[in-house]
Image (cartoon, grey):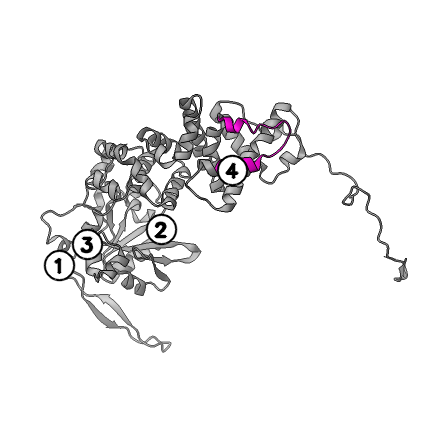
């Protein structure tokens, strides 16, 4: 790969007497470095110049632009890569701005003072900015079966791991995620046909979907995710491969699969995601416990429709004021519609106000198997679900007890209750429908309800003590 030559330029000493520094300044390029990338290829990529696409630097974060320009000014290729290019072309605000370059992780680390190399299997660089902002910079990689650690054990050097932008593009999962934005001339570079798929609204794998999904089954979840978020259709070949190889998702690491579907349930596009998961059969493979609960219902189709309606209410919350909700609330919203028609849930119906937290905790652990969550999230999830019974009891009797609405988590419990009521097409419960806590009592009392007595020792007016 051609890289610009450098020459040292010595800056003059300032008036304040500071010492001169040597800065790397790119020497004038004899030929266009972009064209030199394709000398060994029969066909080059589809390059869309700036006037023919809608990406503007005004829509990019200044931290990402700073990293791009510093890499470019030091003679390296600097591309905006992945989902950020896709979102910008679709007119959306990207969540993250990832950067690809031909500089090695060590070279990137030397360019940015506040950065570090992370990752044991695949090394990349995190560049840190004020306010906690992080820009991820990765080096273009080849199609290689080994990760960085395995390559080092085999005695392979960086030339065997890192590659060209074209090789890196064909490593990616979907065509719409294989687009690059070149900061040097503001063009979009397309090696994999992603522009055409964006125009036609198609989700397609790069290469043979059978091979791609067998090599990494998590790519099936990502194809469904992007179809749900963009509203695109999944290409027929890609869809049939998902249906055939859906069971292979169980071969992946459990924490990795958990993190993937947690992103989807909190994305605000969970309802179309759930419908695609059911339609493709992936729901049964990803959630064996929830699927078993669904099959035990008297009318599985009815419960399935209730589940999708509940998830749609969750999307509405995310779009309004759901940013402060934790993982426990989203998990409870997934489980509650399936429990609602379950005999195990109806067996917990109390004859008085009580919280069946212990029974719900055991039920939750069995339903969400094999996935594990933080202890605090599991406890919060059990409390949210068990708190539904006191609310149901108070609504049915028309009498509210203070210990029900004085709970610290009552607002979230009421929110979960109302989500299910909307999904069922029923009237929600407003805070104005709940009686106030009433006026506070008079004088405080001791532990056993007795009036507080004066201290045995008290001071008289002269300052002395009397007994």
Task: Find residue 410 and report its horizontal and vertical position in percent.
Answer: 58, 36
Q: Is residue 254 left or right of residue 149?
A: right
Name which of mark 1 and mark 3 comes first in the sequence. 1
* Disc nearest the viewer among 1 and 4: 4
Q: How many tags in the picture? A: 4
Residue at the image point whose x is 34% and y is 36% from the top: 229
Q: Nearer the viewer, mark 1 or mark 3?
A: 3
Give above or below for 135 relative to 317.
below
Q: Do the residues bearing badges 1 and 3 touch, measured as CB atoms within 8 Å? A: no
Q: CA distance from mark 1 to mark 2?
A: 31 Å
Residue that badge 2 annotates: 61
Q: Residue at x 30, y 73 (%)?
A: 21
Span highlighted in magenta in the image: 342-364
Q: Quadrant of residue 281?
A: top left
Q: Nearer the viewer, mark 4 or mark 2?
A: 4
Question: Label 2: few (<14), some or many (≥20) within 10 Å?
Answer: some
Residue 60, percent across and down?
A: 33, 49
- Viewport quadrant of the C terminus: bottom right
Check residue 362 in the rendering and tell me which mark sits there, or answer none. Answer: 4
Q: CA distance from mark 4 to mark 3?
A: 52 Å
Q: Earlier in the sequence, mark 1 or mark 4?
A: 1
Q: Which mark identifies residue 31?
A: 1
Decide if residue 91 is in sight here: no
Left or right, 115 with respect to 336, comes to left
When the figure is inspected, residue 175 is found, relative to residue 294, above or below; the finding is: below
Distance between the alpha carbons at the discs numbered 3 and 2: 26 Å
Among the two numbered marks 4 and 3 on one chain, the one whose residue lies closer to the N terminus: 3
Question: What number is the disc on residue 164?
Answer: 3
Q: Residues within 10 Å of mark 4 (few under 14, many from 20)?
A: few
Q: Disc 4 vs disc 3: which is toward the camera?
A: 4
């Amino acid at each position: 790969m051609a890289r610009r030559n450098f020459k040292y330029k010595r800056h003059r000493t300032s008036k304040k007497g500071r010492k001169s520094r040597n800065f790397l300044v790119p020497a004038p390029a004899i030929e266009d470095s972009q064209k030199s990338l394709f000398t060994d290829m029969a066909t080059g990529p589809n390059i869309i110049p700036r006037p023919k696409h809608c990406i503007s630097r005004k829509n990019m974060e200044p931290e990402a632009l700073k990293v791009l320009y510093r890499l470019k000014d030091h003679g390296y290729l600097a591309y905006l890569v992945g989902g950020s290019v896709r979102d910008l072309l679709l007119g959306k605000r990207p969540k993250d701005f990832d950067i690809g370059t031909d500089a090695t992780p060590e070279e990137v680390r030397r360019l940015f003072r506040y950065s570090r190399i992370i990752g044991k299997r695949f090394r990349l660089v995190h560049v840190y900015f004020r306010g906690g902002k992080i820009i991820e910079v990765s080096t273009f990689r080849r199609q290689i079966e080994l990760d960085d650690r395995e390559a080092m054990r085999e005695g392979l050097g960086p030339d065997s791991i890192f590659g060209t932008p074209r090789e890196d593009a064909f490593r990616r999962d979907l065509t719409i995620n294989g687009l690059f934005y070149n900061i040097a001339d503001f063009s979009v570079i397309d090696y994999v046909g992603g522009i055409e798929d964006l125009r036609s609204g198609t989700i397609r794998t790069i290469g043979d979907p059978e091979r791609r999904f067998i090599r990494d089954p998590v790519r099936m979840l990502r194809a469904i995710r992007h179809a749900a978020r963009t509203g695109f259709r999944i290409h027929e070949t890609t869809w049939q491969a998902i249906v055939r190889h859906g069971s292979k998702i169980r071969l992946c690491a459990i924490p990795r699969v958990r993190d993937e579907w947690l992103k989807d349930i909190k994305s605000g596009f969970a309802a179309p995601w759930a419908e695609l998961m059911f339609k493709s059969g992936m729901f049964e493979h990803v959630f064996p416990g929830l699927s078993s609960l669904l099959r035990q219902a008297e009318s599985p189709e009815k419960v399935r429709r209730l589940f999708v309606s509940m998830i749609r209410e969750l999307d509405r919350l995310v779009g309004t004021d759901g940013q402060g909700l934790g993982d426990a609330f989203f998990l409870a919203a997934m489980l509650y519609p399936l429990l609602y028609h379950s005999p195990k849930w109806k067996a917990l119906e109390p004859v008085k106000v009580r919280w069946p937290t212990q029974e719900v905790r055991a039920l939750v652990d069995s339903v969400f198997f094999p996935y594990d969550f933080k202890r605090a999230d599991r406890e919060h999830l059990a409390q949210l679900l068990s708190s539904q019974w006191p609310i149901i009891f108070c609504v049915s009797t028309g009498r509210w007890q203070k210990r029900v609405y004085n709970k610290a988590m009552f607002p979230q419990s009421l929110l979960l209750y109302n989500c299910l009521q909307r999904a069922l097409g029923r009237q929600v419960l407003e805070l104005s429908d709940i009686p106030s806590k009433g006026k506070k009592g008079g004088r405080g009392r001791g532990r056993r309800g007795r009036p507080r007595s004066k201290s045995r020792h008290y001071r008289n007016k002269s300052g002395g003590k009397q007994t």
